[in-house]
Image (cartoon, grey):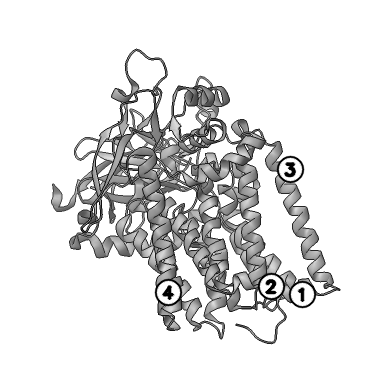
Amino acid sequence: MMSGVPSLSQAAGSPSPTSATRGVAVAAGVLLVIALAAAVSVDVVRALYGIKGDESTYVAMTLSVAYDGDLSYQRRDLERFWGIYKQGPEGIFLKRGKQFRLRLRAAPPFVRVLNAREEPRSDRLFFAKAMVYSIAAAPFVRVFGMSGFLVFHVVLLALACWCGYLFLSATSPPLAAFTFVLAFFGASVVPVYTVFLTPEIFNLTLVFVAYFLWLYKEVTTPPRWLNGIGSEIAAAVLLGIAAYMKPTNAPLAVPLVLALWWRRRWIRGFVVGTAFAVATGGLFFWNALVTGEFNYQGGDRATFYARFPFDGSPRNAWDTRALVTTNDSDAAVVLEPGELASRFGHNVKYFLVGRHFGFLPYFFPGVVALLLWARSRERLVAWRLLNLAGVVGSALVLLLFLPYTWSGGGGPPGNRYFLSVYPALFFIVPPLAWTGPAILAWVGGALFTAKMLVNPFVAAKFTWETTQRGFARRLPVELTMANDLPVMLDTSLRGRIPYGADPQLLLYFLDQHAFPPEPQGMWVAGDGRADIIVRCEDVIDHLTVTAVSPIRTVFSMSMGKETVTRTLQPRTPVTFEVPASGVRGLNSYAYLLTALSSDGFTPRLQDPNSQDQRNLAVQVTLQAIRAGGR
């Protein structure tokens, strides 16, 4: 606990609050009113460009709770969704229900779970996602319609900001605390997720409020209800809900228990740990009571596109479903010693500074928090160290057990899975003397996220556009996760394009500076550096490249090793070799091919009969040569 600094509660209770505190309150109130007004007035379906990510499942489930009072998918849910979106719930996750049965016994184990049978009802299915978010959002949707999702997210973020301000202003000037709280959320990828109709903001707020309930008493003398075991139990329950929503959040509860045991409060730590376990386990048990399965992602689970259960088709849509798994690899594969060290090393680099999902570009205020902690005299305080250990532990769990999907899958903006871990970094921030750290967070974060924050609706839907220009393009590409990069969402089909035959390559065009293969070859543009991921099941030693251009230009290519440069004369083909060095991914090797031309041309201007108005430079053909010359 800090001494010699007036707490916020003391300031608030004073008959004459400071002008700084009044100014902060007014500014916060104005920002909240503006955000709520914007949320209420948005045409959600049009402004959010329809469906993205897992929205179909969460929207349909929330509407079912709000208007039907249940958690099952029936024909009326399909009709309601179609009426709102003018299309079906593309990508919805559903599962068949089972009859869940328990039998009590006099001897251990006292409860036995019997094999569940398929439920007899054929007119309903169940949503195969965690249910708490939809239940919490349902009242807002009932009152505000589809805008209720955005209102709910604004309220959640306002709650998190309020808790953050209380925590930081207990030891820092009000203005410094307020500006840093705004920067912590606003200068990161967080605002983009407010326009996702999915639980990311909900999970983030659960963790943030939980850590506030736990740690507020460490920086000031709080009200009685925040000063005892009750606040710690409440924190554990919130973290239990977060772990139910996303099991990778479970390590965040460990620092809470270890901090109590550090102070030799053994029973209290056990009680708090038990509260966490009961909250998490209780929600999975409740899931079993509703659907017949403990795991909301287990059982007979499928996702649907184009055709949906109960849509009136003569053939049962369940027979044409797409079976799904939650991860591309099991523990035996991801922990295989031969690849573990190399893959983990690459993933650590990508996790920290990756172009699409890195901590540095999309959570830059967290970098500032770490710097403040590192240079503070309080860096060795036990609870701050344990907080940091919890963040590191959560990151390690993601990188070790989800090595090919640790960003959340589906090409999200930034690291979706880390979003709910991010709040823990706020609570390692030491007392602030001035607004400099907030300014640094805003400036550094804006270098990478300003484009996203100008129009979060576009950034949320067209996630591949964020990294095509700007500072993020200077960062390394996450080669271990080629199939989860945002380019895979581009409807112009720039990802996973087959090329060649022996060996066959898969090409991923990360920007608009190169174009998918044509019969005569692949065009590289003349307006910037092209980045192309090349995947192959075999190890590639080098590429044999034939390049030709109708103009004179200086052409450079690289593929993980040294850059090869050739001067091309008009209409004179040149063949050369480009050495390759790549990264082992999921069942393949991935390489980053870069190409750059000094000059370009427009076919329409060279030939009036041409309708091609692209900025082109060099046409290339590629032949991969396997290692060993095979």
Counting from the top left corner in percent of width and height, residue 64 is at: 51, 32
Q: Residue at x 37, y 49 (%)?
A: 284
Counting from the top left corner in percent of width and height, residue 416 is at: 46, 52
In the image, which disc is placed on residue 169? 2
Query: In the image shown, does 339 or 235 lie closer to the viewer?
Result: 235
Q: CA distance from mark 2 to mark 1?
A: 10 Å
Q: Is residue 104 above or below residue 547?
A: below
Q: Residue at x 42, y 33 (%)?
A: 91
In the image, which disc is placed on residue 269? 4
Query: In the image shown, does 374 or 125 lie closer to the viewer?
Result: 125
Q: Residue furthest right?
A: 16
In the image, which disc is placed on residue 11? 1
Image quadrant containing the N terminus:
bottom right
Q: CA distance from mark 2 to mark 4?
A: 28 Å
Q: Is residue 51 left or right of residue 580?
A: right
N-term-proximal mark, 3 vs 1: 1
